[in-house]
């Protein structure tokens, strides 16, 4: 390579330079310096976890760091039970559907944690694996890939191990279907316990507790009426529909208790600050609780959990997610 004016990564002259854009990604050293001075040197657009850092667990069907190409999901196909990993690009561009094959189904064996904490949510029992490909077509929500929890009669759950602190923030992109006479959960933190643990429940059922029919709740310190550390809607901010996409952001700590659905703060039946349960290496149930009786019905595209108060970064997170998903 020439010491001055040589091409970065090349010792030959390419067909064009960055200044006429016919050879994207190839610049002379002089051109690269000029682009940097002008502020037009190409930089990858930050993805969600680049800007809102420190996630405890992060599940998505897209890669959550800019430029990342790591696997986001491991899929089992129905034709021969073979399993294969796919990146966000592979899920989106038809590679996954082609591998599963026409007329076949694909099931989620592992939803990989992109936080860097290796809290991968998996399921070895085939009958408990949610669907991502049905009859050869990738399930979608607002035209982008989604994992499907299809009905209340088919218990599906992915599990991981998580440690939490006294503050929790969460973000989810999903759809949900009302279940008569019961709850549906995007996830459960630890056992479904009256005095500890937590859950994100987009559409509740009738209850003797402090939430009622069709309300949305995020609780982080047990579910008894008198327990603090929770937010519960006063109305129904989540539409009961498998094809209606929602973005939810919630934070609960000793200083904040709030929830936003599609960027709008909900009206509250209960808004209680307080310490969340401290859980050490407990089970995170994605799409159900530990008793397999509160299965989510609907689709999921993204679930992020931070074990800190991220309410101050909510707008940044929501803007990035809304731009990607078109919410």
Image (cartoon, rainbow, N blue to C red):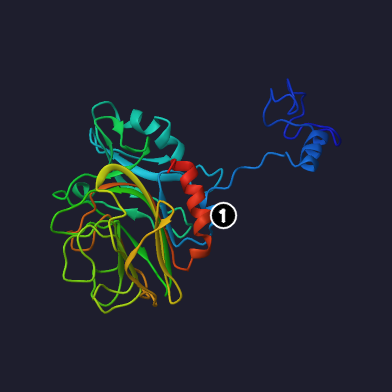
Q: x, y percentage for residue 86?
A: 41, 40
Left or right: 277 as drawn, with respect to 206: right
In the image, farthest residue toward the top: 15
Task: Please report the residue visible at 80 percent of the width from the left and 42 percent of the height from the top.
Answer: 37
Q: Quadrant of residue 203?
A: bottom left
Give the x, y percent position of residue 27: 75, 31
Q: Quadrant of the C terminus?
A: top left
Q: Is residue 169 above or below residue 1?
A: below
Residue ID at (36%, 34%): 96
Q: Residue at x 68, y 32 (%)?
A: 25
Local secondary structure at mark 1: helix
Residue at image coords 81%, 37%? 34
Q: Does residue 10 appear anywhere in the picture? A: yes
Tell how many labels. Answer: 1
Please state, as top left, top right, bottom left or bottom right, where the N terminus lies in the image: top right
Q: Is residue 249 above or below residue 47?
A: below
Q: Residue 205 versus residue 189: which sits nearer the camera?
A: 205
Q: Which residue is denoted by mark 1 in the rendering?
A: 51
- The front one of 243 and 11 is 243
Q: Is residue 49 above or below residue 28?
A: below
Residue 211, percent from left and from top: 23, 67
């Amino acid at each position: 390579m020439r010491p001055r004016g040589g091409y970065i990564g090349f010792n030959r002259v390419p067909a064009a330079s960055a200044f006429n854009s016919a050879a994207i990604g190839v610049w002379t050293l002089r051109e690269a310096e000029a682009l940097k001075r002008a502020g037009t040197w190409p930089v990858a657009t930050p993805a969600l976890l680049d800007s809102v850092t420190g996630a405890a667990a992060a599940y998505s069907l897209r890669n959550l760091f800019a430029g990342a190409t790591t696997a986001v999901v491991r899929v089992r196909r129905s034709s021969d039970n073979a399993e294969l990993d796919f990146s966000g690009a592979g899920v989106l561009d038809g590679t996954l559907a082609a591998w599963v094959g026409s007329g076949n189904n694909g099931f989620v064996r592992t939803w990989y944690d992109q936080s860097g904490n290796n809290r991968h949510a998996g399921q070895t029992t085939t009958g408990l694996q949610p669907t991502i490909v049905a009859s050869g077509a990738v399930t979608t929500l607002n035209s982008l890939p989604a994992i499907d929890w299809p009905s209340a009669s088919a218990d599906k759950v992915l599990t991981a191990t998580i440690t939490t602190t006294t503050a929790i923030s969460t973000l989810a992109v999903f759809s949900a279907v009302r279940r008569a006479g019961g709850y549906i959960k995007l996830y459960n933190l630890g056992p479904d316990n009256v005095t500890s643990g937590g859950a994100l429940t987009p559409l509740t059922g009738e209850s003797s507790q402090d939430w009622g029919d069709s309300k949305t709740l995020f609780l982080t310190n047990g579910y008894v009426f008198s327990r603090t550390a929770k937010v519960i809607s006063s109305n129904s901010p989540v539409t009961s529909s498998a094809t209606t996409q929602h973005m939810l952001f919630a934070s609960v700590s000793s200083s904040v208790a709030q929830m936003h659905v599609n960027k709008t703060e909900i009206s509250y039946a209960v808004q209680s600050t307080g310490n969340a349960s401290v859980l050490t290496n407990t089970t995170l149930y994605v799409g159900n609780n530990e008793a397999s009786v509160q299965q989510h019905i609907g689709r999921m595209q993204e679930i992020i959990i931070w074990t800190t108060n991220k309410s101050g970064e909510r707008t940044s997170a929501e803007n990035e997610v809304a731009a990607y998903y078109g919410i």
